[in-house]
Image (cartoon, rainbow, N blue to C red):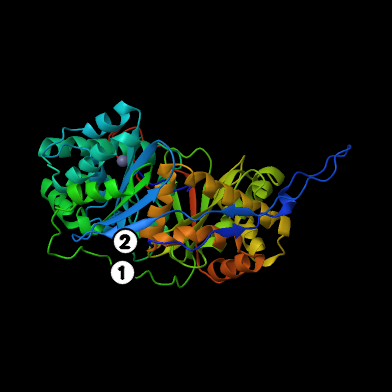
C-alpha cells in the first residue's frame, strides 16, 4: 500500500468506432550498410476501442464493466477521496485510512483480503493520490464473486478499534521514515507540492507528516469513513473475464443494499491561483549525497485538452536514455548524474517539475540555468519530426501494453473517470496523443514555462548535526516554506 509515486513521477455504454492511428514509417528498421533493402513501411496501427459499459446503482455507486478475454479479473474500487481531502491538521489521513481498509470488518478478519487474493495466486494493493484512493485486486476469474462481497463488506462494515488504528498508524509512520526521511532525496521530492501549489490543499504532501499523524484520533477515522467511503463516492471497476449479466446480479446483490448517507460528500472548492512571480527556496537535509535542484511551473488540470501535448513534452525531455535532459546534462556536459522532467496532473490543477542531481563538484545553483535552458529550448527551437515521432510511438506502445492486462485496463479507465471526469476519454486519449504536433508542444510550453512563473528549489547538505542532537528527533528541514 502506498502513496502514488510522487516523483517518477494513475462512460458510456457505447463506444465510437475503431480508431486508426498512424505509426510513422520512419520508425522502421534503418537499412544496414550491407545488402538489406529498406525495411517495408509499417501499416497503420488499428486500435479497437475499449469495450465498456457503465451504470449507476440507485445508491449512487457507479459500475464500469470492462470485459476482456482471458482467465483473470481485476476488481477495483476507486473512491473520490485523496490527500486534498485530508482534514485540517490531519495531513496524511487519506493515506492512513487506505491502510485501515485492510483491517477487519464485521464479517472479515484482519488481512483477510490477502487470504482471498494472494493465497489463490492473485494479488491486491491500493494507492492514495491527491484526488483518489484506489483498491485493486486481481484474481482467477472464478473468484470474482467473493471479491465483490469483500469490497462491499469493507465499504459498509469496516470496524475500527483503537488497537488496529494504533498499529496501522505506526506502519504509516514507518513508511514516512523510509520513503521521506531515509531516502537521500526523499525530503526534496516530498516537498514538490508544498512549493508548487500556493493555496490548493494539494500543497500538503499525501503522505502527511509525523505531527499530524500523531494527532489523529479514532473518532477522526470513523468520521472519515462515513464522510467518504460510501457508494455515491465510489466507482467500482471490473475488468477482465466475467459474464456481464452475472456481474450485474452480483453487484446489485452485494452493493445495492449499502445505504447512501443523507449528507453530501464534502468537497474541496479552493481554486489554485496563477502564480504571480518567480520564487527561490533553499532546502537542506542531513543526508544529501550531492546537491540537487527542482524547477517547478504551473500546469493545467488532468482533463485539459493540452495534457497530451505536455505528455509528449515530458517524453522529449526525459523519457529514456536518448531524451534531451539526459543527453545534454548527463552525457554531453556531465554536470548532472541524473536529470528528469515530470508531469504531475491532478484533477484540479497540475505541475511541471524539472529536476537534476549534480555530478562532481557542481552546486545546486550551477544546475539551474542548464536545466532551464533545455526546457526553454524545446519551447523555442525547431523539433525534428523523427524525434517527435519516436517519442509518440514510445508513449503509444507503453499505453497499449498497459491496457493488455485487466489491472492496467482498469487503471486506465479509473484515471480517465476520476481524474478527467470522463471514463470514455480513455478511448480518445491515444488518438489525441498521436495528433500532437510540434506546434502543440511549443504552444503549451510557451504558455506554462516561458510565460509562467517559476519556483526554484535548491537542495544541499546541511552541516553535520551537533553530537548532542537527539537521535529520535526528526531531521529538521532548513529554509522557509512558502
Ligand atoms: Zn502506505
Residue 113 visible in the current orientation: yes
Position of residue 261 in the picture relative to residue 141 (left or right) = left
Q: CA distance from mark 1 to mark 2?
A: 8 Å
Cβ at disc 1 under 8 Å from ligand 1: no
Which of the image's four quarters has the C terminus?
bottom left
Quadrant containing ligand 1 reads top left
Q: Position of residue 361 (x, y in %)?
A: 61, 41
x, y percent for residue 256: 18, 53
- Residue 353 or 255: which is nearer the viewer? 255
User: Which quarter of the figure has residue 232?
Assistant: bottom left
Q: Is residue 208 left or right of residue 162?
A: right
In the foreground, 130 or 119: 119
Q: Is residue 359 above or below residue 294?
A: above
- Mark 2 crowdedness (10 Å alpha carbons): few <14, some 14-19, many ≥20: many
- Check residue 340 in the rendering and tell me which mark sits there, or answer none: none
The answer to whether any part of residue 313 appears in the image is: no
Q: Which element is circle 1 on?
A: loop
- For this rendering, which residue is in front, 381 or 476? 381
Q: Is residue 374 left or right of residue 172?
A: right
Quarter of the image containing the N terminus? top left
Contact flag, marks 1 and 2 (Cβ < 8 Å): yes
The image quarter in which residue 357 lies: top right
Place of residue 42 in the rendered image (x, y in percent of width and height, measured from the top left):
71, 50
Q: Mark 2 — residue?
A: 201
Q: Tell me the residue that label 1 is attached to.
A: 270
Residue 240, position as x, y percentages in the image: 39, 43
Depth order, front residue of 241/384: 241
Residue visible at 31% across and 34% down? 142
Q: Say which label, 1 or 2, has the lower sequence index.
A: 2
In the depicted structure, whether residue 83 falls above or below residue 240 = below
Q: Quick one: SS at disc 2?
A: helix
Crowding near the residue tagged with mark 1, few <14, some 14–19, many ≥20 C-alpha atoms within 10 Å: few
Amino acid at each position: 500500500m502506498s502513496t502514488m509515486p510522487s516523483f517518477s513521477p494513475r462512460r458510456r455504454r457505447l463506444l465510437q468506432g475503431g480508431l486508426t492511428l498512424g505509426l510513422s514509417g520512419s520508425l522502421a528498421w534503418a537499412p544496414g550498410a550491407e545488402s538489406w533493402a529498406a525495411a517495408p513501411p509499417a501499416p497503420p496501427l488499428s486500435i479497437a476501442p475499449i469495450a465498456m459499459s457503465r451504470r449507476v446503482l440507485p445508491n449512487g455507486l457507479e459500475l464500469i464493466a470492462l470485459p476482456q478475454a482471458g482467465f483473470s479479473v481485476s476488481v477495483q474500487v476507486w473512491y473520490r477521496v485523496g490527500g486534498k481531502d485530508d482534514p485540517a491538521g490531519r495531513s496524511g489521513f487519506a493515506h492512513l485510512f487506505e491502510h485501515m481498509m485492510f483491517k477487519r470488518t464485521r464479517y472479515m478478519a484482519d488481512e483477510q483480503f490477502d487470504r482471498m487474493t494472494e493465497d489463490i495466486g492473485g494479488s491486491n494493493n491500493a494507492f492514495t493520490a491527491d484526488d483518489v484512493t484506489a483498491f485493486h485486486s486481481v484474481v482467477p476469474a472464478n473468484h470474482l464473486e467473493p471479491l465483490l462481497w469483500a469490497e462491499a463488506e469493507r465499504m459498509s462494515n469496516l470496524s475500527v478499534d483503537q488497537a488496529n488504528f494504533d498499529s496501522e498508524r505506526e506502519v504509516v509512520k514507518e513508511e514516512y521514515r523510509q520513503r521521506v526521511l531515509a531516502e537521500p532525496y526523499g525530503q526534496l521530492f516530498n516537498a514538490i507540492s508544498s512549493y508548487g501549489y500556493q493555496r490548493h490543499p494539494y500543497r500538503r504532501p499525501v503522505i502527511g507528516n509525523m505531527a499530524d499523524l500523531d494527532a489523529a484520533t479514532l473518532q477522526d477515522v470513523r468520521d472519515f469513513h462515513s464522510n467518504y467511503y460510501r457508494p455515491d463516492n465510489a466507482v467500482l471497476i471490473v475488468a477482465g473475464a466475467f459474464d456481464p449479466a452475472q456481474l450485474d446480479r452480483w453487484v446489485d446483490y452485494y452493493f445495492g443494499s449499502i445505504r447512501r448517507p443523507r449528507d453530501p460528500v464534502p468537497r474541496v472548492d479552493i481554486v489554485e491561483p496563477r502564480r504571480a512571480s518567480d520564487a527561490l527556496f533553499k532546502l537542506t537535509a542531513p543526508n544529501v549525497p550531492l546537491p540537487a535542484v527542482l524547477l517547478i511551473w504551473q500546469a493545467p488540470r488532468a482533463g485539459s485538452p493540452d495534457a497530451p501535448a505536455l505528455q509528449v513534452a515530458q517524453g522529449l525531455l526525459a523519457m529514456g536514455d536518448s531524451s534531451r535532459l539526459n543527453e545534454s546534462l548527463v552525457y554531453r556536459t556531465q554536470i548532472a548524474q541524473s536529470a528528469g522532467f515530470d508531469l504531475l496532473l491532478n484533477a484540479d490543477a497540475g505541475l511541471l517539475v524539472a529536476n537534476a542531481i549534480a555530478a562532481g563538484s557542481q552546486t545546486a545553483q550551477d544546475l539551474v540555468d542548464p536545466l532551464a535552458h533545455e526546457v526553454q529550448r524545446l519551447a523555442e527551437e525547431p523539433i525534428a519530426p523523427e524525434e517527435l515521432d519516436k517519442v509518440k510511438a514510445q508513449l503509444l506502445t507503453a499505453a497499449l501494453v498497459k491496457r493488455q492486462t485487466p489491472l492496467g485496463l482498469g487503471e486506465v479507465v479509473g484515471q480517465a473517470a476520476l481524474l478527467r471526469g470522463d471514463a470514455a476519454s480513455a478511448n480518445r486519449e491515444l488518438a489525441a496523443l498521436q495528433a500532437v504536433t510540434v506546434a502543440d508542444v511549443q504552444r503549451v510550453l510557451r504558455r506554462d514555462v516561458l510565460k509562467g512563473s517559476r519556483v526554484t528549489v535548491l537542495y544541499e547538505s546541511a552541516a553535520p548535526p551537533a553530537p548532542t542532537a537527539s537521535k529520535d528527533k526528526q531531521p529538521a528541514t532548513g529554509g522557509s516554506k512558502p
